[in-house]
Image (cartoon, helix red, strand yellow):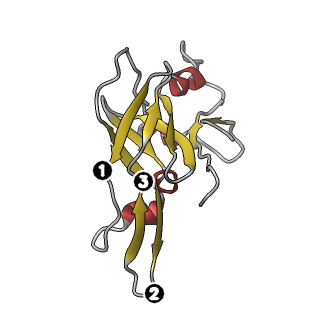
Amino acid sequence: MKNAVSSAIVLIFALQSGLRAQPVSVLHLSHDSTVRVVSRQGNSSGTGFLVGDRLILTCLHVVARTERDSNGVVNGVVFNDLQVMMPSGEIIDADVVSKPIASDPAPLNYDFAFLRLRRKPSGVVSKLVFAKDSDLNVIDLGDDVAFSGYME
């Protein structure tokens, strides 16, 4: 895609009777771990989430232009000029560490990519906290959801 693409990862929380409000809101937690991923080479930008000390989870279409040929072989280019803007505004170069290959096309099939920051952020950062399996059984059709990301 030549246009900048925005992506959002859905953060789900249930508002059901019997559940108590958490002292810190889900949106606050997601905001503190949300980053912006940019490639000038690919004319692309999107949302990512800090999931480790130097590890970012984003969508593959934000960091690469890929396709599968008629034989199922993955072709394309992974952008090599990736920059990640941290919640503090600090900008850090990053590299893709999960590239789709013929023997493991999962990043292409599920549109995800892991990036490794080339250095640690200078300030304190928050990592995204994923829901536990036991939390997922309280979510029903019609429950409220929240989106967090850089929309364009």
At horizontal 45% and vertical 22% (from top left) the residue drawn is 90
Q: Earlier in the sequence, mark 2 or mark 1?
A: 2
Residue 94 sits above or below residue 126 on the image: below
Q: Earlier in the sequence, mark 1 or mark 3?
A: 3
| Residue assigned mark 3 | 79
Position in image of residue 80 (x %, y %): 38, 50
Mark 3, Cα crowd under 10 Å, few <14 / some 14-19 / many 20+, is: some
* Foreground disc of the pair 3, 2: 3
Q: Secondary structure at mark 2?
A: loop
Evaluate whether residue 136 shows in this view: yes
* Foreground disc of the pair 1, 3: 3
Classify residue 142 by image quadrant: top right
At horizontal 49% and vertical 18% (from top left) the residue drawn is 88
Q: CA distance from mark 1 to mark 3?
A: 12 Å
Left or right: where 152 falls relative to 51: right
| Residue assigned mark 1 | 97
Position in image of residue 69 (x %, y %): 45, 82
Residue 11 sits above or below residue 89 on the image: below
Residue type highlighted by circle 1: Val
Residues at circles 3 and 2 in contact by the CB criterion of under 8 Å? no
At horizontal 68% and vertical 39% (from top left) the residue drawn is 143
Classify residue 19 by image quadrant: top right
Residue type highlighted by circle 3: Phe
**Viewer-proximal residue, 142 or 151?**
151
Mark 2, Cα crowd under 10 Å, few <14 / some 14-19 / many 20+, is: few
| Residue assigned mark 2 | 70
Residues at circles 2 and 1 in contact by the CB criterion of under 8 Å? no
Which residue is at the far bottom? 71
